[in-house]
Structures are given as structure tokens and as C-alpha cells.
Image (cartoon, grey):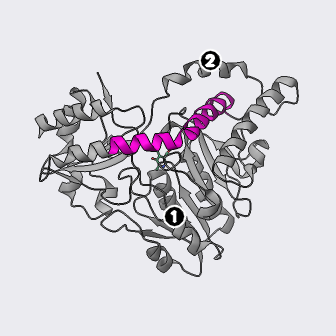
Amino acid sequence: MRIYFDNAASTKILNRFREDILKVFDFYANPSSVHAEGKKARYEIEKVREYISSSLNILNSKDLIFTSGATESNNMIIKGVANFYGKGHIITTGIEHPSVLNVCRYLETKGFELTYLKPNEDGIVTSDKVLNAIKDNTILVCVMAVNNETGVKQPIEEIGNILKNKNIHFHSDMVQYLLKEKIDVEKLNLSSFSASFHKFHGPKGLGLAYVKNTSKIEKFMHGGSHEKNKRAGTENLQSIILGGIVYRYMNENLSENIKYMSKISDKFLRGLKEFEGKIRLNNKENRVLNIFNIELIDKDIQYILPILDMNGVSISGGSACQSGSLSPSYVLLEQGLSENQAKGSIRISLSIENTEEEIDIFFEILRKII
Ligand code: PMP
């Protein structure tokens, strides 16, 4: 039996969608074609767009476009805003996903001025820090909604309130937030957000980019007039239809899922109590229910992760995009952890597929290792 505790890296497409995967092949025409098959395909895509928009209180569904994933969405939006202005100051945080951080670093080489805000010891970048960093030439603020390594929630509603009358684009990477809690996009005062379907049991290679129609942003992908003329390229039809089915299911069951995740999250926290002095929780405050970042005191994950894997447990030392190297997590270092503490830290990320029994087995294995 394998225990998959790496759901922040990617999730499994639930078994209940196996038949749906076959059904999506009934749709094959180019959604831009004007014949019956094309119109049928277009109808399906627009149905998904409408449903997701209304579930998130996005007033105009045209502001929501499908991409190949959150990496593309982040690139498209951040470079799109930067290219519109041509110069200026960008505020972000030192704990963003590489698909934000490395875009910002690239823009720095092109002459943009960058401020990378540090989180406090709880992993939170406060709205005061953002406010104090604003300059006359600030064009863009990028703050993620939930950190992918610690699960810590950032005060994006407060930041949105600060920025709403300032003519500064506010972008949030919402990859680890979407479908974890109820979201009202209007209330958050965002100019844009990115999301990715493979983080909530949907297909890989499918993402969302929301860009409010009043935003000043240059087109990223040039070509045909697809996706409301915002992202050229024939839509990923089958994935969008499947993604729509998964999204609807996850959204309709959101309250139930939150209840279930609370239950298994509490169980996990109770289990940790036994390890006082041996394990330290790196994300005590203000986190989503599914992500735990823990330090195994005086241990090195370089040795622990393979042992866990051999015992049937799949987890990460940080973000999957970084963990190939097993170097200490930059997110934890930014949060103020020492290199040794970061080297001993692992991320456990649960999903609705995980069970209480799996948590018991995990702790049994951990007991042996520690
Ligand atoms: N942002 C965050 C916070 C993520 O966790 C990820 C996935 N690791 C991404 C962006 C990139 O998403 P995708 O895999 O869809 O490119």
C-alpha cells in the first residue's frame, strides 16, 4: 500500500471521473469552427467558463481564460503588465513559486525595479509591508494567496483593499487556494489571478488566468483570436471539458470537503503532539487545512525522504519544482529558519483521497525512523 501525501505537488484524477475521461472524446472539432461539431465544442468550453466564473463571483466570464497551467498564467500576466508599462517598480515576495519569482528576476535584468518582501516568522507577508513598499512608479504587486510549501495564507484581501484605488495591478497566484476555501474574487479586489487544475484532482497541463477587463496588460501569445483574443492557440478542448466536470464536483462538494479536511487535519495535528521536542511545526498560524510543513529536528531530509519512500510514503521536501536538488527550501530560509532547520523540514500535503488510517500508518513509520 502506498500513501500519497504530496497533493500540493499534484493530485490524482479521482476514480469517479474515469468514465468522463472517455466521454470527452465525443468532442473533437475545433471550437472556433462554425459547423455543428465546432459549435458543440464551443458550447462545452463556454459552459465551463461560465460555471467557474459564477462560482468565484467573477462578474464577466470573458475575464477568465484557459491556459496550459499556472506557470503560463503567471508568465502571461506578469510579463503582460510589465510589457504594457515598459518600465517601473514591481513588488513581490521572496516566497513566491518559481513561476513568479523567476519571471520577476528576468524582468529585473530588463531594467524593472524589484522589491522582494520577506515574510515574518509565521510565514506571512503583512499588508503593512506591501503598503510601505509602494513607490510612485509601482506598477504591479504580486502576492500569492497560499504558499505551496508552508500552506500559509497571505492577507490578499487586505492587500487588495490597499491597492484598489491606486492604479496598481494586483496579481495573486491562487494555485494552492482555489477549491480549498470559498473564494469571492470581487471581494478580494484582484486585477488578476492564476490557478491550475492538477492541484484539485483535474488534468495536468490546464490552467486558468483571470484578468479583470480594466487591467492594462499586453498580449503574451500572438496568433489567432482565441480565448477572447487574449491567448492565441486552439483550446485544450478535452482537458477543459474534463477539468470542468472535476471543478463542478469539487465546488459542489466544497463544504463537505472542508469538513473532511478539518477532520483529518485535526487528526494529523493530534498525531504530531506525541513528537514534542522531536518535530516542530513550521506553519502554526493561518494555514490551509491540507498542507503541513514540519521540521524533524536534527535530521536531514536527504536521508529521511528516501526512507519514507521505501516505506511506501510519498512526500516532498518542499515544492516539487525545487525538490529535485534537495537543497534547503528558500521559502523556509526567507521565513527565518536556519539552513539546518530547513534541511530537516518536509511538506506533507493531504487531499480528500487520504484517510485517517493512512495518517496512523504514517506516524507509525515516523516513530520508527525518529
Ligand atoms: N504556483 C504555485 C503556488 C504552485 O504550487 C504551482 C505548482 N507547483 C505553480 C504555480 C505552477 O503550476 P503549473 O504546474 O500548473 O504550471
Give the percent coordinates (x, y) of residue 134. Answer: 53, 78
Give the CA separation, mark 2 to mark 1. 39 Å
User: Image point 47% across, 48% down: which residue?
Assistant: 176
- Which residue is identified by label 1? 156
Amino acid type, callout 1: Ile
Q: Is residue 75 magenta?
A: no
Question: Which quadrant holds residue 239?
Answer: top right
Residue 262 on the magenta span: yes
Q: Which one is in front, 116 or 107?
A: 116
State left or right for residue 22 relative to residue 126.
right
Mark 2 lies on a secondary structure that is: helix
Q: Is mark 2 within 8 Å of ligand 1?
A: no
For the residues bearing labels 2 and 1, Cβ distance under 8 angstroms: no
Instruction: Identify the image quadrant of the C terminus.
Output: top left
On the question of residue 112 being in view, the answer is no
Tag on residue 22? Answer: 2
Compare residues 311 and 180 and report the one nearer the observer: 180
Do we see residue 162 in this rendering?
yes
Viewport quadrant of the N terminus = top left
